[in-house]
Image (cartoon, rainbow, N blue to C red):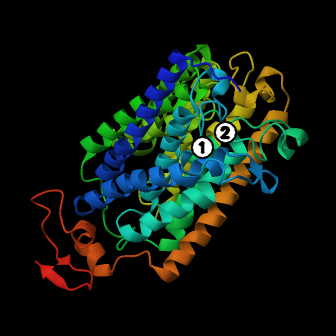
């Protein structure tokens, strides 16, 4: 196949990939500010190691699993086809856009990286960094790459798959199922498997640095324009639509979260503002290039209200999702994915991913697309939860997840990394590999 380079599209996707990669350090600050001071370095390290592990796995076999030719009836891409990125410019889905295949590889690598990093917020303060790193490698391979193949790589949710034939082609413009529902369900599985933090529900576990949280949220919003608008894979009007929808839905979600807080608690907080931003970004992600401005407003409002209410469920249900991965990413991902079935309109988008999809219920398409979105969302939840729990259980009985109680109480930063973030956070003890005290 002849390949003609489109420098505009290529430059835009390279820029978008860089913006999305920035989102993982942004997430590190967002999460890092939300934990206690004795845990902030460990929280940062969980995101940074996700970059290291995810980037390597993606280059060796992850991309080929996600975007290689179908094997096993579309369950997987062939891991050997592009192993080690043996790939030509014309290979892959971006050749018709004039984008070299390696540029698309780079863009998709950043999605795999941040999806793993998102999960870490559910198990903050209490897990071994080594076990986490092994989990990251296995999870990208076993859970993330197959789901990406189903939705984006021509697998069983593609145009020739059973769901498209039975109902319609599911829409996930930039990662509602592949990233956020996936990460949220995985976070729930690990939170249940790992158990609650010492003192959960009995002692305050307040964010130690709210400016970090707001800085991280702002950086995430900035990077998310690459996440969503870049997913069009072209510098065109649909990319512009995705950019504007990312702005509008996120703005509305932040305001809706603050309004919910004000009515419920009497205060509109900085943590609520930052959390509302992330909830809006999550919800608009699958719909960014597929809804009108009014649709984006509706998605943002629903996400801001429902996610603000959902984050309190962990106290009522008794599971310790430390940093609200379930309440924000699972719930927000479900909101955005399902509302596509109401608000999507072919009058807005022309992405090559979704040429066989239908208009939403409110745009004359009936319930077909809505049912499709519900089915794909439920499958993503079950897939991610079951496999993540299985992977986590194996690691629990082999390597172990939890740090010793004295390490968790004294400070996981000292115990796992031998350092603290602040001079004032020196309380506790440093332990060596044999769990013997080496410095007070």
Residue 232, which numbered label? none
Instruction: Decide if residue 86 is on the left or right side of residue 373.
Output: left
Do labels 1 and 2 touch, CB within 8 Å? yes
Task: State the SS at label 2.
Answer: helix
Name the residue nearer the viewer: 39 or 310: 39
Of the 4 image quadrants, the one containing the C terminus is bottom left
Picture quadrant of residue 99 = top right
* Residue located 29% across and 37% down the image: 215
- Callout 1 crowding tier (Cα within 10 Å): few <14, some 14–19, many ≥20: many
- Callout 2 crowding tier (Cα within 10 Å): few <14, some 14–19, many ≥20: many
Q: Which residue is mark 1?
A: 333
Q: Position of residue 412 (x, y in %)?
A: 27, 69
Q: Position of residue 426 (x, y in %)?
A: 12, 66
Residue extending farthest right: 166
* Residue located 70% across and 32% down the image: 340
Instruction: Decide if residue 359 is on the left or right side of residue 230.
Output: right
Name the residue nearer the viewer: 376 or 226: 226
How much space separates mark 1 and mark 2, taking CA atoms?
A: 6 Å
Of the 4 image quadrants, the one containing the N terminus is top right
User: 194 above or below 267?
Assistant: below
Instruction: Decide if residue 416 is on the left or right side of residue 200.
Output: left
Q: How many marks?
A: 2
User: 199 above or below 229?
Assistant: below
Instruction: Decide if residue 227 is on the left or right side of residue 364.
Output: left
User: 389 above or below 335?
Assistant: below
- Residue 117 is at least partly visible in this image: yes
- Residue 290 is at least partly visible in this image: no
Q: Position of residue 143 (x, y in %)?
A: 62, 58
Residue 337, which numbered label? 2
Q: Position of residue 150 (x, y in %)?
A: 72, 47
Task: State the SS at label 1.
Answer: helix
User: 74 above or below 172?
Assistant: below
């Amino acid at each position: 196949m002849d390949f003609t380079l489109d420098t505009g599209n290529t430059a835009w996707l390279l820029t978008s990939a860089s913006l999305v990669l920035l989102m993982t350090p942004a997430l590190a600050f967002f999460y890092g500010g939300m934990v206690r001071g004795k845990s902030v370095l460990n929280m940062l390290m969980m995101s940074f190691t996700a970059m290291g592990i995810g980037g390597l796995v993606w280059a060796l076999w992850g991309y080929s699993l996600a975007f290689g030719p179908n094997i096993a009836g579309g369950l997987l891409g062939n891991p050997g086809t592009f192993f080690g990125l043996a790939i030509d410019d014309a290979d892959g889905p971006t050749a018709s856009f004039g984008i070299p295949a390696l540029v698309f590889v780079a863009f998709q690598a950043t999605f795999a990286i941040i999806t793993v990093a998102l999960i870490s917020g559910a198990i903050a303060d209490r897990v071994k960094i080594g076990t986490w790193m092994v989990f990251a490698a296995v999870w990208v391979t076993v859970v993330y790459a197959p789901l990406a193949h189903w939705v984006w790589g021509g697998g069983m949710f593609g145009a020739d798959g059973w769901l498209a034939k039975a109902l319609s082609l599911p829409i996930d413009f930039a990662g509602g199922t592949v990233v956020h529902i996936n990460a949220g369900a995985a976070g729930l599985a690990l939170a249940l498997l790992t158990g609650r933090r010492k003192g959960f529900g009995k002692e305050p576990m307040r964010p130690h640095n709210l400016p970090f949280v707001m800085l991280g949220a702002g950086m995430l919003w900035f990077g998310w324009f690459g996440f969503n608008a870049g997913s069009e894979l072209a510098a065109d009007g649909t990319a512009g639509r995705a950019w504007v929808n990312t702005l509008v839905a996120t703005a509305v979600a932040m305001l809706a979260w603050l309004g919910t807080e004000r009515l419920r608690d009497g205060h509109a907080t900085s943590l609520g503002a930052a959390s509302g931003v992330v909830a809006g970004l999550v919800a608009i992600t699958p719909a960014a290039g597929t809804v009108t401005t009014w649709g984006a407003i509706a998605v943002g409002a629903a996400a801001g209200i429902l996610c603000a209410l959902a984050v309190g469920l962990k106290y009522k249900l008794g599971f310790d999702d430390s940093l609200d991965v379930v309440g924000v990413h699972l719930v927000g991902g479900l909101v955005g994915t399902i509302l596509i079935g109401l608000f999507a309109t072919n009058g807005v988008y022309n992405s090559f991913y979704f040429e066989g999809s239908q208009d939403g219920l409110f745009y004359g398409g009936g319930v077909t697309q809505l049912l499709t979105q519900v089915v794909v969302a439920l499958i993503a939840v079950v897939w991610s939860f079951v496999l993540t729990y299985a992977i986590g259980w194996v690691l629990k009985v082999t390597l172990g997840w939890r740090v010793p109680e004295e390490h968790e109480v004294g400070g996981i930063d000292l115990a796992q990394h031998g350092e603290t973030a602040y001079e004032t956070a020196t309380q506790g003890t440093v332990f060596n590999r044999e769990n013997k005290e080496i410095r007070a």
